[in-house]
Amino acid sequence: PDMVTLLVRHGVDLNRRDRIHESSPLDLASEEAERLPCLQRLLELGATVNAADKHGKTALLHALASSDGVQIHNTENIRLLLEGGADPGARTREGDSAFSPLVLLLGESAGSSPQEAEATQGFCFRAAQLLTCHGADPSACPPEACLTLLCLKGFRQHFRLLRLLMESGAAPHCSLHGPSCWSGFGVLLQQLDQDGSHGADLRKAQAALELMLASAPVVWLPESLEADLSGGRFGGEGLQALVGRLRPLQHSPAPLKHLCRVSVRRRLQPWPLDTKVQALPLPARLKRFLLLDQEGEADHPGTLDSVRVFAAQP
């Protein structure tokens, strides 16, 4: 960092790019954790944080793309760039977002060893937390680069990350085109219908469903899913119980208590909500309701326990 300061004092352009890759000093400093002091000094000296290379990639996107989740963790670089004003919604010319590298890493982790998969999931969780805290949208298209959609399809493996996204304001459907593009409710039911529904999967699906319902003031279902629900496509007693939660919401106005819960939870975002809800001057029963703890209601027993248990799993 002292050399950076010395060069700038002698008139070196902080934002000058090389001729081959058009990388700036900020881009290069963002790509490795060991370069964090240089990255900090460059930002302090006024480097343009949202400048992009010829591919449209900013320093933030460089930091994310250079992380492999196992050996290279650029979490602090990502944090520093976001706190320095980096745009979390930046996209490359090919349309890749800040979440695209995370989707890629989580997809590749399926064939990794348990230790590597756990390390990758941990990095993606921390990176997603930083991005959503700064306003990044994990539910935007394209579907192949949508982190929320990936977590819904793999809710068995990625429930903890799904909870983070839902409690940080992620939409349970495509945030650009609406549920006609993809709907989390439909994705969840289709996964259970295709792969078979068992006790643990059903409980986890129930918890994921409650998280989605608690994040949406109005539940919009695509026409194809409405037809499937009305036609009784989804079989099995456990799966029918989940369908029973959605069918009344197709055309009925949301209850006032549901709208209030969604509003309060949104005001308390981002994740985690548990400690924030417990600090509210409210009766214990209302706190349980805000935290999705509906124990004692015959049709939704112990949802909070399920959410906490599954979210604690790696």
Image: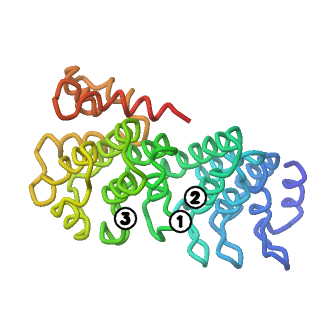
Secondary structure at badge 3 equals loop
Q: Name which of mark 3 and mark 2 comes first in the sequence.
A: 2
Residue drawn at the location 58% of the way across and 61% of the way down: 98
Near mark 3 (Cα within 10 A), the count class, few <14, some 14-19 or many ≥20, is some
Amino acid, disc 2: Val
Q: Alpha-carbon distance for marks 3 and 2?
A: 17 Å
Q: Which quadrant of the structure image shows residue 252?
A: bottom left
Q: Earlier in the sequence, mark 3 or mark 1?
A: 1
Looking at the figure, which quarter contains the C terminus?
Answer: top right
Q: Which residue is mark 2?
A: 103
143 versus 311 height, above or below:
below
Residue 189 numbered mark, or none = none
Is residue 305 found left or right of 260 in the rendered image? Answer: right
Q: Secondary structure at mark 1?
A: helix
Quarter location, residue 173: bottom left
Q: Is residue 159 above or below residue 234?
A: above
Q: Are marks 1 and 2 in contact (CB under 8 Å)?
A: yes
Query: Can you tell which mark lies on residue 175?
Result: 3
Q: Amino acid at mark 3?
A: Ser
Query: Toward the viewer: 215 or 226?
Result: 226
> Is 36 or 116 nearer to us in this picture?
116
Query: Is the residue 31 above or below the residue 71 in the image?
Result: below
Per the rendering, the mark at residue 145 is: 1
Circle 2 packing at 10 Å, graded few (<14), some (14-19), many (20+), is: many
Q: Residue at x 26, y 33 (%)?
A: 290
Give residue 275's position: percent from left, percent from top: 39, 26
Q: Marks 1 and 2, how far apart in space? A: 6 Å
The percent position of residue 142, horizontal first and vertical second, equals 48, 71
Among numbered discs 1 and 2, the one appearing first in the sequence: 2
Tag 3–tag 2 contact (CB < 8 Å): no
